[in-house]
Image (cartoon, rainbow, N blue to C red):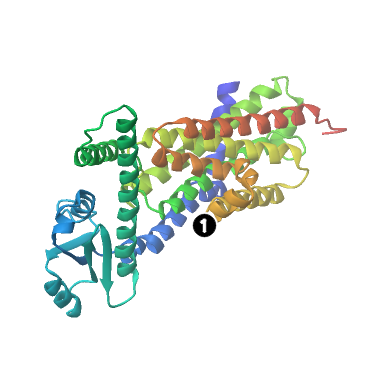
Amino acid sequence: MFIHNFKYALKTLFRNKMLIFWTFAFPIILGTFFNLAFSNIENSEKLDIINIAIIQNDDFESNDIFKSVFEELSDKDNEDRLFNTYYTTEEKAKELLENKEIVGYMKLENDKPKVVVITSGIDETIFKYVTEEVVQTSVIIKNLAEEEIQKEMMSGNLAINYEEIYKHITKITKEQEAKIEDISNKNLSYTMIEFYTLIAMACLYGGILGLVSINQNLANMSSQGKRVATSKTPKIKIILSSVLASYITQLIGVALLFIYTIFVLKVDYGDNLGLIISLAMAGSLAGLSIGTFVGTVFKANENLKIGIIISITMLGCFLSGMMGITMKYIVDKNMPIVNKLNPASMITDGFYSLYYYDTLDRYLFNIGSLLVFAFILITISYFSIRRQKYDSI
């Protein structure tokens, strides 16, 4: 009976044009609009390489920190380099600046940099900011060197080689910097938030499928429900087979969305596609649980219940950043409890964690939160169905 009802429920869902639209077609259409709206945003806002000059005097040549930093930021083999640097004399640098071939130049005197610009803009600000950061780093290294000197003096070593200590500290600093690994995916961009929320929305729209399946088995909602109520077959088997059919249908819809965004829209989900799919499966279960909850707890007609699910889904996606990428951060900052209870935010937060963290702790926390969320709502739905009685059918 379980298999028979599962097949029947699956056929019924696929024959429902409204369900097919919201589950399969609408996320794909919305994803297409997202791609048209955001595909050129990053290219138009990408910063160009900044042309600068550095006065190549003795002070600069003897300062290992400034030399290494600007060499790294100007390395032509680095696709993400920030500067195109001219190492020249002060006279030549002034000439380049007057001809607007550079945005400014930096002259180092007694370890104190002097940045010269003739206009104020984003490129000039970046140049000044980077120089200030190098100064702060230099101060930190010198403080470390002084601590090493004090340790040598405390140990009674009077033959202190200051230059060797300074080089030693600089070497340690470079070694530590080399150990820092960029664990974030290079393809991650803020426009990906829109696609994350799109997947979250597609997962939560599974609630409509869950609602329809539940309504088909409620005596006060459909003719099939009346037959189920009078049947000798355990109600729990019939409901579970219907819910499983809804979940399978929802997973097919999410799979089609992934295929479309990956192969047609060329969305890059990174190297963790298996984990992303697992998160989407947990999110789909959470969406399905919302449908069963609304279907059993709310006493209303099917259209009103569908409206409730769509409202819950769109509100959750709005708070997780779909209509404005800063909304999620505003909510996290001012009302963090809201997004901790928001399944759409759990899904998108799980996606972010795969890019921003080198461990799966936060990802697993979001997976667990979605499963707990689904378990609670399904449990409430189960007891709600058990308590339902009818005077006549």
Q: Residues within 10 Å of mark 1 (few under 14, many from 20)?
A: some
Q: Position of residue 235 (x, y in %)?
A: 70, 24
Residue 275 in picture, x, y percent from top left: 41, 33
Quick one: 155 or 23, which is closer to the camera? Answer: 155
Residue under the point 36% across and 36% down? 272
51 in relation to 175, above or below: below
Q: Is residue 298 above or below residue 379?
A: below
Question: For this view, does 143 lie left or right of residue 217?
Answer: left
Q: Residue at x 68, y 49 (%)?
A: 308
Q: Position of residue 256 (x, y in %)?
A: 41, 43
Spot occupied by residue 190 in the image (x, y as percentages of width and height): 41, 54
- Helix, strand or loop at disc 1? loop
- How many marks the image carries: the answer is 1
In this rendering, does residue 130 appear at all?
yes
Is residue 204 something that shows in the picture?
A: no
| Residue 389 in the figure: left or right of residue 4 | right
Q: Which residue is mark 1?
A: 326
Q: Residue furthest bottom?
A: 98
User: Residue type at mark 1?
Assistant: Thr
* Frontmost residue, 73 versus 137: 137
The answer to which quarter of the image holds residue 95 is: bottom left
- Residue 235, above or below 121: above
